Amino acid sequence: MMGKAVRGAFVLLAALNATPARAQDPAAFYAGRNVDFIIGSAAGGGYYIYAAMLARHMGKHIPGRPQVVARLMEGAGSLTAANQLYSRLPADGSVFGAVFTGAVVEPLIGDASKARYDSRKFGYIGSANRETSICYAHKDAGFNSWRDALDRKLIVGGAGWASSIRQFPAVLNTILRTKFEIITGYPGSKEAVQAVEKGEVQGTCGIQLSSFMPTNGGWIDSGYVKVFGQIAAPAGDPAMNKLGVQNIWEVVKNSEDRQVLELIFNQSEFGRPYIAPPGVPADRLNALREAFDATMKDPDFLAEAARAQLPINPMGGAEFANEVKKLYEVPEALVARARRALE
């Protein structure tokens, strides 16, 4: 049997051996290393396109200039990736991820049995865009405003549990009594949009404008689909306002309904979230945050985003973390109602 002194020596030795790794400055840690960038969405959708583009540019801004390697980990509306980042993947700064906005708020207002993490403990690196979401219908559906969604059924495509194209129509059905019939199970927004062409669904509700426009914006110009509603800040999205698209807040009359919807829809403020596991050393998390901020100003990155018609309106990591903190300070009664609305 090992004596106490020997066991103590092993513990001390292990601690001493571990200290230099954590004490390495970020440049020394990242030099010659691959950094895994976990993308919690299907290939080809808006989240994937943003994240893949970020991966191509961010490494040159991280001290030590590591190679950022994008790795797909789709499943359950990014909950698979978020669960892995929280408790299974290294928390040394060598891994970070891209998840749906819904995955950030899922433990608060969704299903805690699926989201096995506390979102307040993630390391927040930043978000590439503050989003407007839209609801649209095939021209044959004859939908022109939110009033039509209140009056008659529209079959819409949904993705994973925490995806906005499932969450947003579900909560609108509960709070405002819209009549969306949600067909779930599509891997991501790309497949849900394609389902309109195939005649499987009539439209999509809650899709980010930046996901829709680069590949399907021509549908609006040609009249193939009609955008009948936007979910945006009270002032609305300028492009949607120009088209006369009605903002959701124009039809929300009850103040408590508005508070519940704000709790759910305000996640669009961090429309393209990038997060690190809990416990990443502060200097490495700060290095990742600064690299993200620098990438958002990188001329090459911005030129690529412009070519892809992807808007860049970033939120830094510290502001992102504060937004999450504020969400968790909402009164429990409103949280409980939001949770019920998303079921």
Image (tube, grey):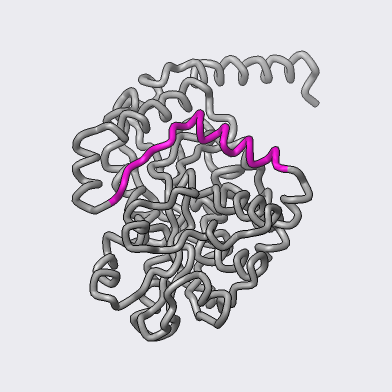
Residue 38 seen anywhere in this rendered image of the structure:
no
Q: Quadrant of residue 134?
A: bottom left
Q: Which residues are magenta?
A: 310-330
- Name the residue rendered at 53%, 29% in the picture: 280
Question: Quick check: 247 left or right of 337?
Answer: left
Residue 134 position (above or below residue 300): below
Where residue 238 appears, as percent x and y from the top left, is 34, 51
Residue 202 position (above or below residue 324): below
Q: Nearer the viewer, residue 214 or 42?
A: 214
Where residue 244 appears, as percent x and y from the top left, is 37, 63
- Name the residue rendered at 42%, 29% in the picture: 289
Q: Quadrant of residue 226?
A: bottom left
Residue 81 position (above or below residue 6): below
- Name the residue rendered at 36%, 40% in the picture: 313
Residue 148 position (above or below residue 340): below
Q: Nearer the viewer, residue 339 or 304?
A: 339
Query: Magenta segment: does it hold 319?
Result: yes
Where residue 301 appears, as percent x and y from the top left, is 24, 39
Q: Nearer the viewer, residue 133 or 176?
A: 176
Where residue 197 appears, as percent x and y from the top left, is 34, 81
Question: Quick check: 303 left or right of 25?
Answer: left
Question: Quick check: 226 left or right of 221?
Answer: right
Question: In the picture, which quadrant includes the N terminus?
Answer: top right
Q: Quadrant of residue 173?
A: bottom right
Residue 215 seen anywhere in this rendered image of the structure:
yes
Question: Quick check: 4 left or right of 343?
Answer: right
- Name the residue rendered at 37%, 86% in the picture: 140
Question: In the picture, which quadrant includes the C terminus?
Answer: bottom right
